Image (cartoon, rainbow, N blue to C red):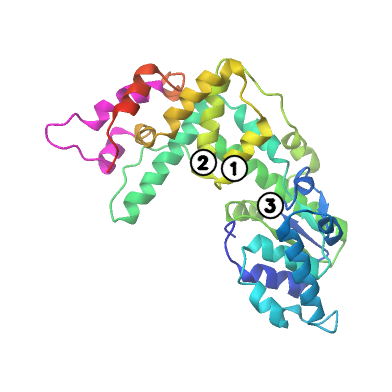
Amino acid sequence: MEHESVRPEVGDFILETRPESVVVETAYTRDHAAAKGARLTGQDLANSAEEWHQIALNLTAHLQAQVADSEADLTAAPLWQQVRVSAPAEQVALVAALAVAAPLVNGDRNREVTFRRLLNCTAEELDAAFGSQAAGNYEDLVCRNGGSWPSDKAPTSDAFDRIVLRERDAVLYHSLRSEARAVGEGMNVVGIVGSAHADAIAALHARATPTLDDIAPLLTSPELDEDQSYGCRRAIMERLLVLRSAPAMAAASQESLGDVGFAHVAAYEDTNEMYANCRMLLACLTEEQLRAVVSTRKGCQDMWDVLQVVRQARPTQGGKGYSAPALETLRTLPVLS
C-alpha cells in the first residue's frame, strides 16, 4: 500500500482473518519503533499520551460492543463502515488489530540504523542518488505532459535503493517469516508494508531467504564517519530524504542523528543551501535532459552554461558539495516562472 493512503480493505482483511499478529513497517510509538520485533498491544496504548491512540482504543471498544458475539463478523458492525474509510490505512489497521486482540509487531529496524548507514555512504554516492532522483522526477513530469525523455543510461540502483529499500526489504521479510514460524503451522500473520517493499519481499519469500545470519549486519548501527566530508554528506542525505521519502523523514533523521557539530556546520549549511535550491535539480541533468525541461530565450545565456559552476561543485564531478561561485550563481538567478 501507499503510506498514509486510505485503504479500507487493509482493515477488512485483518478483521476477516483474525491473525495471531500483525507485522507492520510503520511503528506506532517510540518504544514500538525502538527495535525490530517490538510488540504493541492495547494495554501498551492505554498508557500513551497520544490523543489518537486513545481514540483508537475508544473506537475498538465501541466496535466490539456493537457485535454481541465475539466471533461474529466485525466488518458488519455499523461503526466499522465509518472507521474503515475515515483514516489512513495504518491507523485503520491499528483499530482492526486491537479489535481482534492481535499484537502489532514492528517489522522494521530502528530508523537510526538506516540513517547512520545511509550517512556513512560517500558524498559521491549520496550525490549520485540525489541526481538520479532529480532526473527521475523530471522524467515523470515530462512524460506526463506527453514529452519524450532522453535516457542517460544511469544505473538502476543507488545508495538510497540499497540501504533504505533493499536492506529493509530483507529486514521486513525476516520479521514476517520469523513471526509466521513463531505462531505455528496453520495460523495467520498479516503484514502491512509500503508498496516500495511488497514485490521485493515476495521475491525473497520465493527464494526462502535470508537467514538470521544474513540480516544480522543490517541491524547494526555503525559509528559515524565524521571526516571532513561529514557536513556535506549530512546535508545531501537530508535533501535526498526530502526528495524520495515522506516529508517527516528528513526531520526524523535530524532528531535521530542530533546536532551537526561546530566543526561541520559551515559545510553543512552551504551544502544544504545548494541542494535545497531548485536549480540544483536542473544541475543534475545531462545537457540533453536539461534541454527537454528548460528553453532559453533568444539573447539570454544558455542555462547549461549558467549551471556549469553549480555542476562543478557536485561531489560526483569532483567538487565538495558547495563552492562560493556556485552559491553566488544560485543566489542571483531570477525566480523560476
Q: Distance between the Cα atoms at labels 2 and 1?
A: 7 Å
Tell me which label, 2 or 3, sits earlier in the chain.
3
Main SS of the magenta part reads: helix
Q: Distance between the Cα atoms at labels 2 and 3?
A: 18 Å
- Element type at mark 3: loop
| Magenta stretch encompasses residue 201 | no
Quadrant for the N terminus, please.
Answer: bottom right
Q: How many labels does the image show?
A: 3
> Looking at the picture, does residue 219 appear above or below residue 301?
below
> Looking at the picture, does residue 262 appear above or below residue 56?
above
Q: Is disc 2 in contact with disc 1, using a CB cutoff of under 8 Å?
A: yes
Q: Distance between the Cα atoms at labels 3 and 1?
A: 12 Å
Residue behind mark 1: 249
> How far from the left and from the top, in percent, is residue 275?
44, 31
> How far from the left and from the top, in percent, is residue 163?
62, 37
Residues rendered magenta in the picture = 286-313
Report the residue at 56% width, 40% height from top: 161
Residue behind mark 2: 242
> Looking at the picture, does residue 108 appear above or below residue 277?
below
| Magenta stretch encompasses residue 298 | yes
Report the residue at 44% width, 34% height from top: 276
- Element type at mark 1: helix
Q: Which mark is residue 316?
A: none
Q: Is residue 119 left or right of residue 212?
A: left
Q: In this view, does 114 lie to the left or right of 57?
A: left
Residue behind mark 3: 26
The front one of 46 and 83 is 46
